[in-house]
Image (cartoon, rainbow, N blue to C red):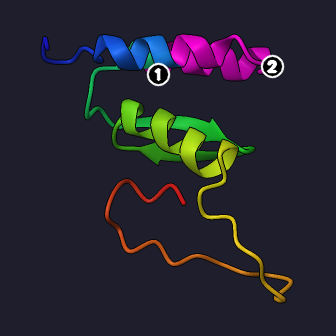
Amino acid sequence: MIKGKLPAEFIQYVRRKKRTDVDKDALSQIKDLINTPRFTEKKVTFHGKEIVIPDAASFLFMQDEIFKKEIYKFSTLSKSPYIIDGGANIGLS
């Protein structure tokens, strides 16, 4: 892999994701993130808030896992549950 370039498998994954219903601003941001070199800090708008991400590839993968596939979803009686992210990756959850 050339330094700063995303793996071909990841680019194909994101291209498949772009075919789903996504608003134009989000699609533009995804295109920008695809072209961002690995491990480059970047500001993005996510769920209406501006955040700083340390790696575009990790962000794109994790936002799909956490928010679309809902891998942390659980049942609770609490009206305001929360998850403690132990810092094993980029802190997106």
Mark 1 or mark 2: which comes first in sequence? 2
Q: Residues within 10 Å of mark 1 (few under 14, many from 20)?
A: some
Is 27 placed left or right of 83 in the picture?
A: right
Disc 1/disc 2 C-alpha distance (Å):
18 Å
Residue 21 rendering spot, x and y as whole percentages = 80, 19
Q: Is residue 19 magenta?
A: yes
Q: Which residue is mark 1?
A: 33
Viewer-proximal residue, 62 or 26? 62
Determine the residue positioned at 78% across, 83% down.
76
Give neighbour class at mark 2: few <14, some 14-19, many 20+ (Cα, 10 Å).
few
The numbered dot on residue 21 is 2
* Above or below for 8 versus 71: above
Residue 62 locus on image (x, y percent): 49, 44
Secondary structure mainly formed by the magenta segment: helix
Q: Residue furthest left?
A: 2
Q: Quadrant of the N terminus?
A: top left
The stretch in magenta equals 14-33
Q: Can you tell which of label 1 and label 2 is closer to the viewer?
A: 2
Q: Is residue 93 left or right of residue 23?
A: left
Rendered residue at 31%/64% (across/down): 88
Query: Residue 19: x, y in percent?
Result: 70, 10
Q: Residue at x 65, y 46 (%)?
A: 69
Amino acid under label 1? Leu
- Residue drawn at x 21%, y 18% is 4
Q: Quadrant of the C terminus?
A: bottom right
Above or below residue 86? Residue 15 is above
- Across and down, in percent, residue 40 comes to 29, 32
In the rendered image, residue 15 lying in the magenta stretch gets the answer yes
Q: Is residue 80 above or below residue 72?
A: below
